[in-house]
Image (cartoon, helix red, strand yellow):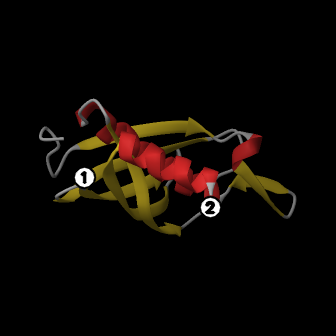
């Protein structure tokens, strides 16, 4: 995690498939839940190579604005920037574009975890 630096950037691009869409009138368009997933996956992709063995990451919050529709079959691109590091809490700024315009923006927080502790806690919950 020591190699993570504020200002680091990455990009993640997806094709808008039917499973990522909702229906608006006669049109299938990229859904807000799918945009949220794109934001989280972009931040995870940026972070993952910088974690130590045994570390993982989880999402804490997503504040998202869906600004414009993107029709099925188009591509969407998340441009993510690491905006803050507070011990193990990471804050990201993300802009989402299609091939015409910016269609979304988000602030996303993730937390770096110890995977073994996380799994232990999860197992206790499953067994309860």
Horizontal relation, residue 108 to residue 18: left or right: left
Is the residue marked by circle 2 packed among few (<14), some (14-19), or many (20+) residues within 10 Å?
some
| Measured Cα–Cα span from mark 1 to mark 2 | 22 Å
Observer-nearest of 92 and 59: 59
Position of the C terminus by quadrant: bottom right
Position of the N terminus by quadrant: top left
Residue 112 percent location from the top left of the image: 30, 49
Residue 27 percent location from the top left of the image: 81, 55
Residue 43 visible to the viewer:
no
Q: Residue 109, relative to residue 37: is it above or below?
A: below
* Contact (Cβ within 8 Å) of mark 1 with mark 2: no
Observer-nearest of 56 and 103: 56
Residue 126 percent location from the top left of the image: 62, 51
Observer-nearest of 3 and 96: 3
Residue 95 percent location from the top left of the image: 40, 56
Horizontal relation, residue 21 to residue 63: left or right: right
SS type, badge 1: strand
Horizontal relation, residue 20 to residue 109: left or right: right
Q: Residue at x 30, y 41 (%)?
A: 47
Identify the image quadrant of residue 8. Answer: top left
Q: Residue at x 85, y 64 (%)?
A: 25
Q: Residue furthest right?
A: 26
Residue 32: mark? 2
Q: Residue 13, relative to residue 97: is it above or below?
A: above
Observer-nearest of 107 and 70: 107
SS type, badge 2: helix
Looking at the image, is mark 1 or mark 2 earlier in the sequence?
2
Residue 82: mark? 1
Identify the image quadrant of residue 114. Answer: top left
Q: Residue at x 23, y 55 (%)?
A: 88
């Amino acid at each position: 995690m020591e190699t993570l630096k504020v200002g680091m950037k990455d990009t993640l691009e997806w094709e808008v498939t039917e499973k990522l869409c909702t229906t608006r009138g006669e049109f299938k368009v990229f859904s807000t839940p799918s945009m949220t997933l794109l934001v989280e996956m972009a931040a995870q992709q940026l972070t993952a190579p910088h974690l130590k063995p045994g570390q993982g990451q989880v999402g804490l919050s997503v504040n998202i604005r869906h600004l414009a529709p993107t029709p099925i079959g188009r591509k969407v691109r998340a441009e993510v920037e690491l905006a803050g590091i507070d011990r193990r809490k990471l804050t990201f700024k993300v802009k989402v574009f299609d091939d015409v315009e910016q269609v979304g923006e988000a602030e996303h927080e993730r937390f770096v975890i110890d995977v073994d502790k996380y799994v232990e806690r999860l197992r206790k919950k499953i067994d309860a």
